[in-house]
Amino acid sequence: MASDPPPDDAATPPAANGHVRDHDNGHGPSPAKRPRAVISAAEIRAEFAHHDAAVARVNNGSFGCCPASVLAAQARWQGLFLAQPDAFYFHGLQQGLLRSRAAVAGLVGAGDVSEVSLVDNATTAAAIILQHAAWSFAEGHFARGDAVLMLHYAYGAVKKSIHAYVARAGATVVEVPLPFPVASADAIIAEFRAALAVAKEGGRRVRLAVIDHITSMPSVIIPVKELVAICREEGVDKVFVDAAHSIGQVPVDVRDIGADFYTSNLHKWFFCPPAVAFLHTRKDDPIASQLHHPVVSHEYGNGLPMESGWIGTRDYSAQLVVSEAIDFVNRFEGGIEGIRSRNHEKVIEMGRMLAEAWGTFLGSPPELCGSMVMVGLPGCLAVESDDDAMRVRTMLRKDFQVEVPIYYNSRRVEGQEMAKDKSGDPVTGYVRISHQVYNVREDYERLRDAINKLVSEGFTSCKLRPSEKQEA
């Protein structure tokens, strides 16, 4: 297996004034930085002045955000490639990626930089893990019918990948039917144990458990360390944690969590431009050398970090500015820990404000929320399908300039009555609100007022359905 290339000064793009920054030495960000004043509200507004000022953007969770200073660093990398692509490839790219990987390794507590690969997103990371599982079925290492366990609320693209790769190869897929609204972490753990028992019925081997750290829709922090420990106790072969939303929302220590594979996006909550994520594997795991990027290129067979570092001619600049994103978060009081704490406090405050205004409730207790929270919509809106939810979301965007995802809760867990609002109507629709450093109270007040207006006008989601619109 080829080793990582040594650091090279050519990996460092020039600063805006043409000079190389003194803390860029090819080994990641220097731990000692010149003191800098805490970023001001005006500076935060300037960093995100490229956002559409007409839109109340309370959906950081879907696509994240990137400050102007990081975008400028990205543009410098793009300029280097466009000016002299051969020099960029032969003398800059791999060294720049190595610096970013080293920065990520320090952020998440990895044992060694060789354990970190950079990929486009968590969905790509999932494809890498699931591809290996599919090969294990095809090559006879796993028996047809062996189980793969996943949460019912696993991200849609990952669920489809599980079926496309491992179900097609012969796996039995078992889902964990989590309750929502969620009362406690204990309820999640109980459902997980029950589903794992189903997966093991008849002596069946559980080859892989796919566990979210923070589910996307509905958004809930999963007690991932406890679930990994249960998998170890119960003999699950491997555990893959899909933590697309985690870094920047919750503390991440991959060795403490203890999973075999862990991935998180850096463009959602860590201020990198789209698209960049990391995949962590343990260097002492023999499977690490058997993982391959699904796009095969010239580095095939040289280890996943190298394979992922060259998948053909494309724009790699988003993967090269992790150090600049770290510089940005360090401008805030408390760094990323301070950002996380303030975002959590604010999103809970705004969620409670909306719930009180609408006569509803939060979808999970604050300790199971990060920088996102689910808030029940008034039941009289009668959201009765995923299509209803999408149409209401589109209406809020077009008619009210409010950007927020809407979730339709179709599940009725046995023994759990559908939650109701203060008027006694079942709550089937929820908004997922986010809070990031650029958000202000007025963003959430616009959402509050938009829903209140719809309620006062007697709106129901059926009015947006194609058949009802045509009849009208």
Image: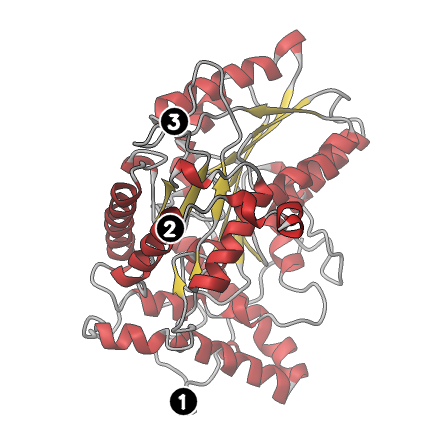
Disc number for residue 419: 3
- Answer few, some or many: residues within 10 Å of disc 1's Cα (few below 14, many 20 plus, some between 14 and 19): few
Image x and y of residue 182, in percent? 38, 28
Task: Identify residue for label 1.
Answer: 19
First of labels 3, 2 by sequence position: 3
Q: Which mark is residue 141?
A: none
Mark 3 and mark 1: span between their CA atoms? 60 Å
Element type where label 2 sits in the image: helix
Confirm or deny contact between disc 3 and disc 1 (CB under 8 A).
Answer: no
Would residue 39 appear left or right of 158 to someone viewing this image? left
Which amino acid is tagged 1? His
* Amino acid type at mark 3: Ala
Q: Of the residues tagged 2 and 1, which is closer to the observer?
A: 2
Mark identifier at residue 451: 2
Instruction: Give the residue type at disc 2.
Output: Ile
Query: In this view, which residue lies farthest toward the right?
Result: 139
The mark that comes first in sequence, 3 or 1, is: 1
Q: Earlier in the sequence, mark 2 or mark 1?
A: 1
Q: Please tell me which residue is depicted at 49% across the width and 48% down the height of the picture.
A: 244
Mark 1 element type: loop
- Mark 3 surroundings within 10 Å by alpha-carbon count, few (fewer than 14), some (14 through 19), many (20 or more): some
Residue at 49%, 67% in the rendered image: 273
Q: For residue 138, what is the image quadrant?
A: top right
Nearest the camera: 295 or 466? 466
Closer to us: 74 or 420: 420
Q: Using the rendered image of the protein, determine whether residue 233 is visible from the camera's viewpoint.
A: no
Q: Would residue 263 be seen by someone viewing this image from the given angle?
A: yes
Near mark 2 (Cα within 10 A), the count class, few <14, some 14-19 or many ≥20, is: many
Q: CA distance from mark 2 to mark 1?
A: 51 Å
